[in-house]
């Protein structure tokens, strides 16, 4: 199971994504809008055991609904993000 926390949600200028790993893993993160278009945030990293934080800048994005997709070792979790300006 993937343990994540996306906050604040709804967000304005920046949101934080926290991921807690029980062992070292390859982690892929992508953010899309409601129509599936990839947005400016994308990460693909090898991460060590423990908690990791990512800062997602949303200042230049229009208000609306977005999705942050987290893929770790073949498991996928999608978090809904609401941006309000």
Image (cartoon, grey):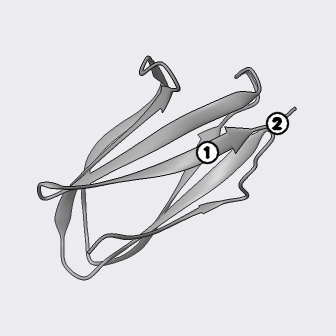
Rendered image quadrant of residue 57: top right
Q: Position of residue 83 (x, y in %)?
A: 73, 37
Please tell me whether residue 40 is drawn above or below residue 83 in the rendered image.
above
Please tell me whether residue 75 is drawn above or below residue 50 in the rendered image.
above
Pick the residue in front: 85 or 41: 85
Q: Position of residue 36 (x, y in %)?
A: 42, 22
Q: Residue at x 36, y 39 (%)?
A: 43
Q: Quadrant of the C terminus?
A: top right
Total numbered badges shown on the rendered structure: 2
Q: Quadrant of the N terminus?
A: bottom left
Q: Which mark is residue 84?
A: 2
Please tell me whether residue 37 is drawn above or below residue 3 in the rendered image.
above
Q: Most extreme residue toward the right, as rendered? A: 85
Q: Position of residue 18 (x, y in %)?
A: 50, 65
Q: Residue at x 72, y 44 (%)?
A: 14
Q: Most extreme residue toward the left, as rendered? A: 74
Pick the residue in front: 34 or 21: 34
43 left or right, relative to 39: left
Q: Position of residue 62 (x, y in %)?
A: 74, 20
85 left or right, relative to 69: right
Pick the residue in front: 40 or 65: 65
Q: CA distance from mark 2 to mark 1?
A: 10 Å
Q: Which mark is residue 81?
A: 1
Q: Which mark is residue 48?
A: none
42 left or right, relative to 22: right
Q: Residue at x 48, y 52 (%)?
A: 79
Q: Secondary structure at mark 1?
A: strand
């Amino acid at each position: 199971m993937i343990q994540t926390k996306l906050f604040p949600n709804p967000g304005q200028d920046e949101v934080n994504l926290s991921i807690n790993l029980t062992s070292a893993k390859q982690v892929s993160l992508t953010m899309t809008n409601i129509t599936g278009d990839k947005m400016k945030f994308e990460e693909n990293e090898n991460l060590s055991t423990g908690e990791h934080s990512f800062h997602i800048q949303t200042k230049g994005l229009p208000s609306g609904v977005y999705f942050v997709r987290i893929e770790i070792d073949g498991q996928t979790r999608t978090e809904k993000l609401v941006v309000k300006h």
